[in-house]
Every structure is written in C-alpha cells, then in structure tokens.
C-alpha cells in the first residue's frame, strides 16, 4: 500500500487523507488543504513532465467542481479543447499563452483568466509554468 503524501491532509486533522479508489488521496471531503509547493514538485518529478507533456493532478473532484494543478514545460501545450462549464486558469508560476479562436492571451504569475463554457482554446507554456485549472459543472436541474 502506498504511503499518503505528507502534504495532503483533511482540514483540522493531523492524519493524512484516506485513500479513495485508485488515487492515494481524497478528491472530495468536507474540507481539504493542499501545499501547492509540494504538489508542484511532485508534478515536476513525473516522467510525463520530463518528456514535455502536460502534467496534472486533480486536487478536488466534486459533481459540480474540479480543481486541477497543471505543469507545462516551456514549449509544451495542451491541444485545443472545450470545457462543458465555465473555467478559470490561475497562473502560479511562469508564463502561459491561451489561444482562442480569434485572439490569444498571455498570463503571468498571479493573473487569472475566466472562460465561459464551450469556448475553444489551447494552453501553451511560453516558459515553464504552473497553473490551477478550475472547472465548474452545473448540476442537473440547476440554473
């Protein structure tokens, strides 16, 4: 059995978050706290990152919300895609370039971009970059 990383803790507890499915940590709980520095270092150690592929870790997975920490090496990019709900891209380190159908936007550390559902875009790293991707998904029957 894998050991729980020390930086993933249920809020208010000194105990690591319990295992959940194939993940070695909880994706959903009443309260979760993350050490983004440690999470970033773990992403940068992954083989996919070293190869230059987009590398991410889902931190939160709720029916109506996903929060994903992403790492991109300079020159890497996520191919064009669309989200079914509104998204935000919060640049934590480096420089990102999001290409939309008719424009492109650069984000530097500390900047946040929001896109409405269905907007086609890709994300590339101008320099090594870390960002938080938040995806909202409307629940059935909610407006």
Image (cartoon, rainbow, N blue to C red):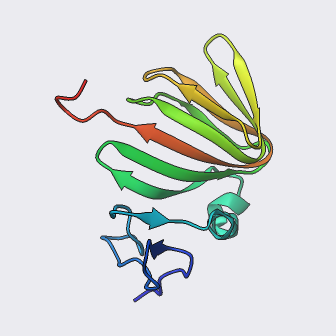
Residue visible at 39% across and 63% down?
Answer: 31
In percent of width and height, residue 38 lies at 66, 70
Viewer-proximal residue among 46 and 61: 61
Figure quadrant of the C terminus: top left
Q: Is residue 33 left or right of residue 98?
A: left
Give residue 65's quadrant in the image: top left
Of all residues, the one furthest to the top in this rendering is 102
Viewer-proximal residue among 72 and 65: 65
Of all residues, the one furthest to the front in this rendering is 12
Q: Is residue 137 above or below residue 30?
A: above
Of all residues, the one furthest to the left in this rendering is 141
Q: Is residue 20 left or right of residue 110?
A: left
Residue visible at 56% across and 28% down?
Answer: 114
In percent of width and height, residue 91 lies at 69, 43
In percent of width and height, residue 106 lies at 76, 29
Figure quadrant of the N terminus: bottom left
Q: Is residue 100 above or below residue 75?
A: above
Residue visible at 48% across and 22% down?
Answer: 116
């Amino acid at each position: 059995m894998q050991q729980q990383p020390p930086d993933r803790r249920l809020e208010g507890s000194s105990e690591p978050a319990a295992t959940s499915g194939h993940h070695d940590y909880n994706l959903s709980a009443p309260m979760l706290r993350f050490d983004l520095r440690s999470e970033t270092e773990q992403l940068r150690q992954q083989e996919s990152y070293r190869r230059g592929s987009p590398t991410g870790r889902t931190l939160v997975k709720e029916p109506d919300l996903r929060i994903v920490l992403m790492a991109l090496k300079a020159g890497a990019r996520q191919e064009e895609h669309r989200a079914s709900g509104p998204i935000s891209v919060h640049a934590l380190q480096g420089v990102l370039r999001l290409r939309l159908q008719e424009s492109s936007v650069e984000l530097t550390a500390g900047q946040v971009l929001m896109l409405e559902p269905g907007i086609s875009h890709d994300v590339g790293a101008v320099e090594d970059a870390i960002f938080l991707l938040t995806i909202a998904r409307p629940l059935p029957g909610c407006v």
